Amino acid sequence: MKLLYDFFPIILFYAAYKFYGIYAATAVAMAASVVQVGGNWLVKRKVEKMHLISMGLIIVMGGLTLWLKDKAFFMWKPTMINWLFAVVFVGGTLITGKPLVQKLLSGSIELPDPVWSRLNWLWVGFFIISGFANLAFVQHYRAAEDQLRAAYPEISAEQLERFDCKNNFPAEHLQPCELAAERESRWADFKLFGLLGLTVLFILAQALYLAKHMPEEEAIEDTSEKDES
């Protein structure tokens, strides 16, 4: 449930995108992020830093998208968030001398220092890879949009918003329009299902990694208890 709550703005963005296009979906994501942070404050009287940072980037990048009518700003947002968290995990470790992930999870589990360090770097790697994966989908779409703009220079912002190719584009520009629409849809699918899937897989892999070390600690505790008796 926590993971679904974290992805709440993305889920609403995806639903709005499928019905109304990317600009309307961007506005929905901006509103959803404010509701997410505000709701958390009303219920728990605290705000998670991850949600607050995400809300700030959604509002800034979403605002630029709506103002300039350029989808790229909002498309870059997942990359910026992931890379920002990678910097935070590295910077937090360098500043405090302890892995940041240890500060976040030490209240729940106990691990040897080398394991905490490896786990922290695994999170850094995950954030970097996720950012590059999103960027690849964005660039893939942008290449198709550039081809469409080159073939049809008089294209309007409204035509770029929905890609209703059969109704809003001349027959000779139908193919580049459909290519751009397909690649934009792939990016939206990745934004929800791809990033969510990567996150779930990484958490499962992390759990398996931690499970290798948890029994060792329990075995040591059992041995010490036997020695005392």
Image (spheres, helix red, strand yellow):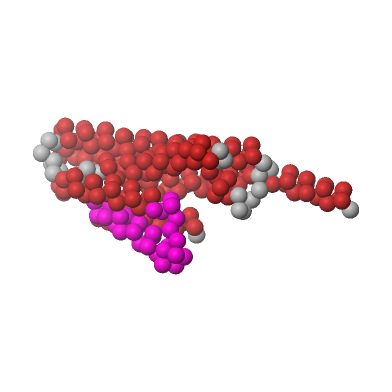
The prevailing secondary structure element of the residues shown in magenta is helix
Measured along the vertical axis of the image, is residue 153 above or below residue 61? above
In screen coordinates, is 97 left or right of 36?
Answer: right
Q: Would you say residue 17 is visible in this rendering?
A: no
Residue 52 lies, in percent from the top left, at 39, 53
Q: Would you say residue 41 is visible in this rendering?
A: yes
Comparing 187 with 109, the one in front is 109
Comparing 14 with 174, the one in front is 14
In screen coordinates, is 200 left or right of 165?
Answer: right
Residue 68 lies, in percent from the top left, at 19, 44
Picture quadrant of residue 19: bottom left
In screen coordinates, is 113 left or right of 81?
Answer: right
Query: Which stretch did the figure color magenta?
Result: 23-52
The magenta stretch spans residue 35: yes
Q: Residue at x 41, y 63 (%)?
A: 41
Q: Residue at x 64, y 39 (%)?
A: 113
The magenta stretch spans residue 53: no
Residue 127 lies, in percent from the top left, at 46, 40
